[in-house]
Amino acid sequence: MHPQRGHADTGAAEALQAAARSKLLRMTATKWRIVGALENLARLLKPLISPISVANVAEQPTKILVVEYWNLGDLAILVPFLSNLRSAFPRAKISLLINEGLEPLLERQGIVDELIPVRVPWAQHFRRWRKYNPFSLDWISLLSAIYTLRKRRFDWAFSGRMDVRDNLLLWLTGARRRIGYGIGGGGSFLTDRITPDLSRPHRVDLWLQLLEAVSSVSNAKRMDFPLSSVDSDLADQFLGERGIRPGSFLIGIHPGARSAIRRWGEDHFAQVAERLLQQPDVHILWFSEPDSCIRMPHLDRCVSVSLDFRHFLAVLSRCHLLLCNDSGPMHLANLLNVPVVAVFGPQKPEWYGPRGPHDRVVIRPEFSCRPCWDYCVFDQPYCLRAISVDEVYKAVTSQMKDIPKSERTSVTAVGPAEMVSSHA
């Protein structure tokens, strides 16, 4: 390659990486300096660890590792990638590094051969001190997992996180080919630094782009997420015992979210529920996690649902639509082809929103501080507080008109959800 041409190509690649970093991560200068310091420190430690052989890119992998140890919604977002990975490499053994406790979501789905549970310290807590507390027992879990992964000698390893920590973790696993994004730092730990397509910023698409870059997959296939007949029968029994007959319009409401700044508020959801129940054929399932402090409003035809994970999925699959926050249950509803009305505050729907053609996102677009992830810059999330009960109620009733009572509408199309926004 001509030297000047090489410099030009390198400069263009760096420009694309910088543009992607600006659009997809919004990293501050301080955070970027911290990432750089971490990466430099890790480079110093490289000689102390046995070297990793490089994979022949022409070889088909027999052992593949996927790293996604975060939360329920992140795991649901990963499912289309795993399904297409299985189709692309049907003979490979696929292992998933997964957050401990989330294994039931993928059990019996046939898209992963092995689940490796782990507790990664910075994925367990919101407070930064607790994330990096050196005395946390979660570090033992992480180090044990790394030791286990290195012994497996994976051919390929994937991470779609755009995070220096994940890229370092890929390198520590000893995988011969390490495929991910370097825009968040740690690109030197990867063998394949993929530049994201900024026209497809949704996290589902960013995962799929990794697979498209290293395989012949060009279009994601339709993906099903079947439940067992036993679970389905139990869901029907649960509803029948509570007097919910076939033909009723069943609306699920899940007012919870892992992050407090993503919760619109139980009282607001209850007000929407009260208005919806003025229609005689509507029944509401008020979802909450076992042992949670969420309280159900005392309304006729409003049933409390607090079940284990598999039964929750089965009952959720019977809903005609789900009203919820930007949360894990929103992504689970998409997997189950249940239409969604999602109330969005600090996050960007084009990154994490529901994906169905009949889904609706209720959002106030005028807040320029978005996205702020789990750390609001104000004393409370005004982007959520500004959303009225009327806005959400209108979004739900509008969607109800588009959904037949006898069947759910598929949400496997790749188009974005409809935005329902209003200005003050």
Image (cartoon, rainbow, N blue to C red):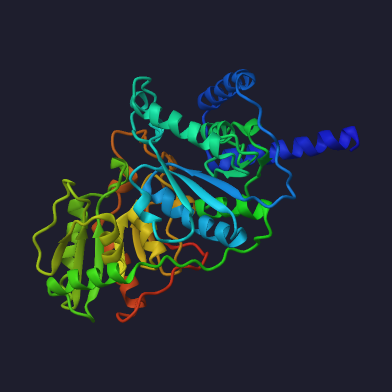
- Where residue 220 appears, x then y in whole percent? 58, 63
Screen quadrant of the N terminus: top right
| Residue 251, placed above or below residue 72 | below
Q: Residue at x 41, y 69 (%)?
A: 358
x, y (%) of residue 104? Answer: 34, 53
Closer to the camera, 270 or 294? 294
- Left/right placement of residue 111 relative to residue 234 reads right
Q: Which residue is nearer to you in this view: 93 or 354?
A: 93
Horizontal side of residue 351 vs 1, given as left or right: left
Q: Residue at x 66, y 40 (%)?
A: 193
241 shown above or below 108: below
Point 77% across, 36% down: residue: 10
Taking the image as shown, residue 252 lies to the left or right of residue 367, namely left
Give how far across and how far down residue 362 sits, in percent. Answer: 36, 58
Q: Residue at x 60, y 31 (%)?
A: 186
Could you say which quadrant of the image residue 154 lies in? top right
Q: How many marks?
A: 0
Snapshot quadrant of residue 218 = bottom right
> Which residue ends up furthest to the right in the rendered image?
2
Specify whether residue 124 is in view.
Answer: yes
The percent coordinates of residue 364 (x first, y second) are: 38, 52
Does residue 326 appear in this view? no
Of 389 and 66, nearer the camera is 66
Q: Residue furthest front?
A: 151
